[in-house]
């Protein structure tokens, strides 16, 4: 089955629009007429989408230089004007649709190795709506003869709203330097200020946290959105620009920003994985919605 320009998924009160040709991204997810993710405008770029997959790594590889066990690989700096590589290649490629139903779709991205990523690998993504909400899964398999560094993540954007509160927990912060790359892991005393639901108004962040609990909740005036992710997503990237863009991104990921270079320098708990030929890394995320007040059904 060839990739399509867009796919509409529906289940009960939920509707979602998936764009395989635009980074395998979700353009929207609506429940009872409400946008639970930031909706993409018409003719959106992938960075304007509601959610997109991060594969085969999350966030930045410093100065586009991948430090792998076999050698160093110069990658393409794919996010001008930054000098780094960011978020892998999956978000900048067209995905193939391998199967679909009314409320789910399976996508595939076969990669032969190129300037964005030197290893042959296969990435798979599934998107499904059910009675509780939205389920996403993502995997990467190393098809290369060499052992391959690997990581995965999801990049959902949530709309800001007056009174929005966030609750989640982590126990460490990867402190970033001037190049937006982590320098070291702050002591465990750098615990989450959102251990109980706290307002996000005025919060500004572009950071990676370690020791994430694997769950978070966003408390809107009339509903709660609960995020949960698989156990291997022990890191969380939070991007809260606190500007006119009017969103926050809460991103479950398997590893720290620039994890491959950090691990090569001897840093611990980076989450960096090394996949032998044929090995697969998989993650999953669920977003479940709960009504807490009066909602008008669309």
Image (cartoon, rainbow, N blue to C red):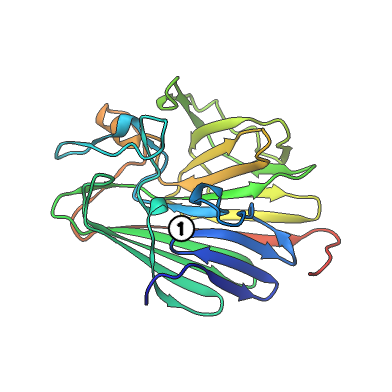
Q: Residue at x 41, y 27 (%)?
A: 181
Tell me which corner region of the image, top left, top right, bottom left or bottom right, holds residue 225. Answer: bottom right
In this image, 237 relative to 259: left or right?
A: right
Residue placed most toward the observer, 95 or 293:
95
SS label for mark 1: loop
Image coordinates for residue 16, horizontal then vertical, percent? 60, 66
Residue 269 visible? The answer is no
In this image, 35 relative to 255: left or right?
A: right
- Residue most toward the front? 43
Tell me which corner region of the image, top left, top right, bottom left or bottom right, holds residue 203. Answer: top right
Residue placed most toward the observer, 219 or 111:
111
In this image, 97 relative to 76: left or right?
A: right
Q: Which residue is mark 1?
A: 22
Image coordinates for residue 153, horizontal then vertical, percent? 44, 50
- Residue most toward the right? 294
Image coordinates for residue 204, horizontal then vertical, percent? 63, 30
Which image quarter is the N terminus in? Answer: bottom left
Against 97, is 257 above or below?
above
Residue 44 visible? The answer is yes
Q: Residue at x 13, y 54 (%)?
A: 145
Tell me which corner region of the image, top left, top right, bottom left or bottom right, holds residue 133. Answer: bottom right
- Residue most toward the bottom? 101
Residues packed near mark 1 inside 10 Å, few (<14), some (14 to 19) or many (20 plus): many
Q: Give the mark count.
A: 1
Which image quarter is the C terminus in? Answer: bottom right
Image coordinates for residue 4, horizontal then vertical, percent? 45, 70
Q: Residue at x 52, y 46 (%)?
A: 251
């Amino acid at each position: 089955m060839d990739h399509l320009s867009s796919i509409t998924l529906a289940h009960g009160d939920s509707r979602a629009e998936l764009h395989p040709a635009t980074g395998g991204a979700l353009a929207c997810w609506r429940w009872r007429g409400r946008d639970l993710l930031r909706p993409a405008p018409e003719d959106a770029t992938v960075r304007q989408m509601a959610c997109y997959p991060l594969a085969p790594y999350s966030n930045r590889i410093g100065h586009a230089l991948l430090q792998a066990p076999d050698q160093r690989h110069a990658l393409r700096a794919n996010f001008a004007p930054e000098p780094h590589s960011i978020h892998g290649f999956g978000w900048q490629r067209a995905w193939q649709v391998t199967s679909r139903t009314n409320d789910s779709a399976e996508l595939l991205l076969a990669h032969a190795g190129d300037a964005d990523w030197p290893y042959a690998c296969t990435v798979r993504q599934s998107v499904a709506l059910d009675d509780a909400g939205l389920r996403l899964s993502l995997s990467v398999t190393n098809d290369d003869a060499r052992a391959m560094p690997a990581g995965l993540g999801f990049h959902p954007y949530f709309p800001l709203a007056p009174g929005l509160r966030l609750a989640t927990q982590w126990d460490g912060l990867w402190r970033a330097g001037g190049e937006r790359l982590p320098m070291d892991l702050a002591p465990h005393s750098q615990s989450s200020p959102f251990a109980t639901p706290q307002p996000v108004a005025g919060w500004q962040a572009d950071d990676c946290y370690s020791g994430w609990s694997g769950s978070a909740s966003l408390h809107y005036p009339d509903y709660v959105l609960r995020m949960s992710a698989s156990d291997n997503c022990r890191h969380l990237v939070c991007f809260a620009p606190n500007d006119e863009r009017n969103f926050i991104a809460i991103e479950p990921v398997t590893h720290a920003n620039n994890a491959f270079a950090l691990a090569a320098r001897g840093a611990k708990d980076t989450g960096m994985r090394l996949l032998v030929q044929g090995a697969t890394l998989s993650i999953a995320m669920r977003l479940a919605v709960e009504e807490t007040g009066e909602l008008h059904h669309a």
